[in-house]
Image (cartoon, rainbow, N blue to C red):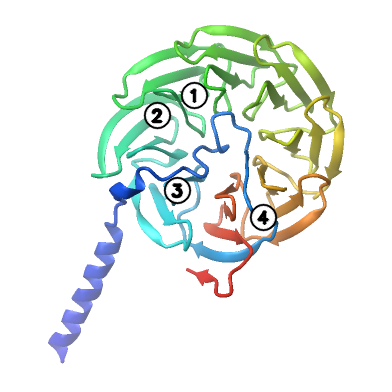
Amino acid sequence: MKRTAQYFLLFILLLVLAGCSNKFKMPRESIGEPSEWAYYKYNIESGGARPGTFSGKLDVVWENSFRNKPSGPLTISNGYLIYPGSKRKIEIFEIATGSSRGYVRSKRHPQSGMIFQDSLGFFVEAPRLSRIRCVNLLNKKKLWQRKIKDATAGLIIVDSFLIVSSSEGSIYAFNIKTGETGWVYHSETRLAAPPSSNGHLIVQTTDGGKLLVLSASDGEEVFVIEIEAPVLGSAAIDDKVYLADYSGNVYALELDSGEVVWKNKLESKFWAAPALSGGLLYLGSTDGKFYALNSDNGEIVWEFSPGDVIRSSPIVVGDYVLFGTMSGILYSLRAEDGLIAARRELAGSILFSPVSDGRHIFVATDKGELLCLGSAPETASIK
C-alpha cells in the first residue's frame, strides 16, 4: 500500500514537471493561417479597427485566471491568442476555447507582446537592458537576438524589417530573418510609443513635442514637425496622420508634408493612441471622457463620460467601439452614436488594449484575469 502511494506521488510529480516544461511548438499547418490581430494596434497603420461580426455583447465565452500578470499587449496570430506575462513566459492559447498550447520562455518580462511572421516569433524583453528576440516556433530554438536600450511596448514589420523604437530616442530596423541592422535613426527626444507605418513611411510620435516621419527603406528623415505637447500614444494612419497630445490637442496632418489639416483643443489629457474607423476618430482620456471626432474636420460627433481613467487605446470591431478603464470596466459602445451596448466589470485594471478576431473580444487585467467575451454559446468553456 505504501509503495502504491509512492508511485502515485511520483506520477503526480511527473505530470507537474511535464506541465512546467510545455514549451510552445507551432504545427506546420498553422503557418499559413491568418493573423487576426497581428500587432498591438491590429495593423502597422495602428488604426485599432478591424471588420467583423461582433455583436456588441460582453458575455463570457471562456476565462482564465492565473498569477502571470500581463506585461505587454495581447496579439492574435495563426489561431492563437498570445499573452506576454510577468512570470517571464509568453503564454499561447487557443482562441476558440482558451486551452493552453504552451509558452515561449523569456529571460526578462516580455515588454512588447509577441508578433508572428510565418514560423518566426518576435518579442522584446523588458527594459532597461532590452533584447529583441527572434524564435523559430517550429523547433522552439532562438534564431537571433539583439540588444537595445529601453524599448517601447510594440513591434511592427514593414517589408523585411522588424521596426522597434526605444524611449532613449532611437528607432531600429532589423532584418527579420538574420537580425542584421538595416538602419538606425537617432533622435534627440524620448520616444514613449511604438512606431506606425503606411508601408513606405515610418511615423513616430515623441514626448518631446515632435513628430518624426522617416523612409521605411533606409531610415532617412523625410520631415520633422513640432507638436505643442508630449505625445504618449502612437499615431493612426490612413491618408492622413492622426494623433493626440497630453495637453488635449488632437491633430490631423498631411502624410506627405506634415501640414496641419485640422486641430481641435479638447478639455482632456490623452495618454493612449486613438482608433480610426468609418470616418470617426475615437479617443479615451485620463480624465474619464471618451470622444468620437469627425476625421475630416475634427468636430465632436459624440461624447461619453465613464468617469474613470482610460490608459489603454480603444479598438473598433465591426459596428462597436470598445475600451477599458483603470477601475476594470470594459465598455462596448455603438460606434455611430456612443450608446452603451454592454458593460462588464472585471477584476483589475485594464492597462492594455483589448484585441479581437472579429467575433469575440479578448481582454486581460493586471490581476491576471484573461477573458474571451461576446455572445455566449449555450455552453461556455470556463478554465
Q: Earlier in the sequence, mark 3 or mark 2?
A: 3
> In the image, is 2 to the left or to the right of 262?
left
Which disc is residue 82 wearing? 3
Residue 83, position in %: x, y? 46, 49
Residue 363, position in %: x, y? 58, 53
Looking at the picture, which amino acid does disc 2 mark? Leu
Q: Earlier in the sequence, mark 4 or mark 2?
A: 2
> What's the distance in space between the residues labelled 4 and 3, CA to CA?
21 Å
Cβ atoms under marks 4 and 1 closer than 8 Å: no
Front disc: 3 or 1 = 3
Which disc is residue 328 wearing? 4
Q: Secondary structure at mark 1?
A: loop
Residue 345, position in %: x, y? 69, 61
Which residue is identified by label 2? 129
> What's the distance in space between the residues labelled 3 and 2, CA to CA?
23 Å
Which residue is identified by label 1? 166
Front disc: 4 or 3 = 3
Q: Earlier in the sequence, mark 1 or mark 2?
A: 2
Q: Residues within 10 Å of mark 2 (few under 14, many from 20)?
A: few
Which disc is residue 223 wearing? none
Front disc: 1 or 2 = 1
Cβ atoms under marks 3 and 2 closer than 8 Å: no
Cβ atoms under marks 3 and 1 closer than 8 Å: no
> What's the distance in space between the residues labelled 4 and 2, CA to CA?
31 Å
In front of the other: 199 or 165: 199
